[in-house]
Image (cartoon, rainbow, N blue to C red):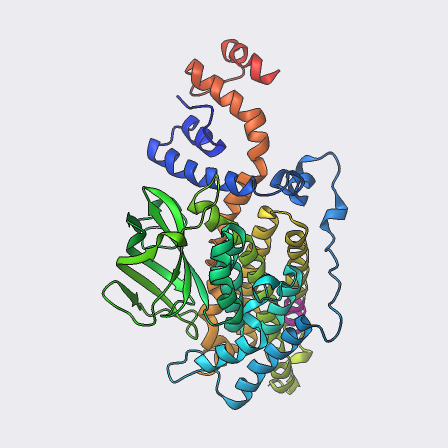
Amino acid sequence: MLGTEASFAETALKLGGKSDEEVRRTGAMDKADEQVESLFARQHQTASSPIHRAVWDRAVPVELFSPVVVPSKSGGSPNEEVLRHAPAVVEDHLMRGSLYDARGKFRDEVFRNLANTGYWGLLVDKAYGGSAISFTEFARFLTRMAQLDPTIAGLASVHGCIGAVDPLQTFGNAEQKQRFLPKLASGERLSAFALTEPCAGSDLTALRTVAVRRGDTFYVTGEKLFITNIAPGRTIGLVCLIERKPAVLIVDLPNEESDQFRLKSYGLYALRHAHNMGIVFRDFPVPVENLLDPGDGDGLTIAYHGLNRGRVALCANAAGVMRLMLANMIPWAKFRKTYGQAIETRELVRRRMGHLAGLIVACDALTEWTAGLLDQGYRGEMECIIAKVFGSEAQKEAAIELFMKTHGGRSFLHGHLFGDNVHDFLAPCIYEGEGEMLGMALFKSLVKQHGKQFFEPIGRTLATKGIKQPNLANPSHLWALKGPLM
């Protein structure tokens, strides 16, 4: 029998005849989702969000679908300096051909130069040396940076949205914030979030990395996979099991690999300019005081919290990437001729460029709207999922159906924007949650409140009566349901 404390997902799966293990694992993730929900004021929870109200309210709250206008900072403010100088750093390195080292990775000098502008502290509170700009400003800025280098823009999101910054600012105590955030704001240490494992992707209940406490130290053993922005000397949020429960440790990685800590390279096509590797820990020591306390939740609560920011950032990045594509297509369409005429005069090519422009505008609009919701304090679960899925699918369509086809066979030449970056154009369909999986998560969020209120009592009654295939034409079935249906 199901207890009264069972989550909506547990109840639905159990009544649907799923195995006890699937019920338990999915229920753990659903409870983590509910714990994240409880962090938000009632008026900003999912049931009060624009999409939920548009579907279930008697009238559509049109006003909630307009972006919130965030006033620009006054000229000469520190924030304006950061937003102006950081792009100039990347432009300078692009002009000098000094953005990448011999391995094709970003040079350390680039990260240091960006740090000097305040690039890594944009989302860090001012008390710890950051700029604390609004998320709307941050998202607009990512779009601008993505037009120069999409991966550099993406690393700002990894560091500030899903790296160690958000977990510390949301769940860190005063001592932890003071110890870690100033270095993260200054760029002295860059950050990542170590969640994914060889057997734990969408199913985060399959975590195997464990931390065992001995005295004042946790000793971590396990393996992480596909961790972006990882390198010796960086700071990570590490999700692991402590006494069989998910937890998050903030970990300062040593400057050199050892038997206790080593990186695992596997040859990744996407993100070739960044460091994306696995991490192998063997009895790696972490001070007990580095454990984050989520209150009523656990490590999955912390892991879930920053995802929506990362999803909006992905959409903002896509808007910048597609601008790069369009800027590349326009001169090509003027240069390339067929039958004596530039292809820019051809209806097919004009349609492609017009469609691409429309996708850019749509990503801009979704980014502005969802970032504004986050700035207002909304959780924005469904809205941010839509931004992520649309942004990634728009970028995929733009790359394959519009950009590649317009450039033809030259798309596959070494040095071509498409051929050199096709994996990066497609990878966002997986990052921050695979698109169709997120679609199912959106549906669960949309029906959860009404499912608990109306359908769960029906399911419980049918289970109690032993009715596995209800038939409302059967008087006994209808009579059994008279209570929950009234």
Which residue is drawn at the image coordinates 63% and 83% (left, top)?
A: 331
Relative horizontal placement of residue 457, taking residue 374 as reference (left or right): left
Residue 386, compared with residue 38, is above or below; it is below
Residue 444: where, in percent of width, then height?
Answer: 53, 39
> Is residue 351 located in the magenta-colored stretch of the structure?
yes
352 versus 448 height, above or below: below
* Residue plotted at (41% across, 78% down): 105
Instruction: Please report the bounds of the magenta region as a residue range.
Output: 350-357
Which of the pair 362/117 is nearer the observer? 117
Q: Quadrant of the C terminus?
A: top right
Measuring from the top left, give residue 173's x and y in whole percent: 50, 51
Quarter of the image with the N terminus is: top left
Residue most toward the bottom? 96
Residue 432 vs 464, above or below: the answer is: below
The residue that appears at 34% across and 68% down in the rendered structure is: 254
Residue 96 position, x and y percent, is 52, 90
Q: Is residue 325 visible?
A: no
Q: Is residue 117 left or right of residue 286?
A: right
Residue drawn at x 54%, y 13% as measured from the top left? 478
* Most frequent secondary structure within the magenta stretch: helix
Place residue 46 in its image quadrant: top right
Depth check: 212 or 394 in front? Answer: 212
Q: Quadrant of residue 95?
A: bottom right
Whether residue 171 can be seen here: yes
> Total marks drawn?
0
Which of the two residues, 109 or 106, is positioned nearer the viewer here? 109
Is 329 part of what is drawn in magenta?
no
- Give coordinates of residue 131: x percent, y percent: 62, 66
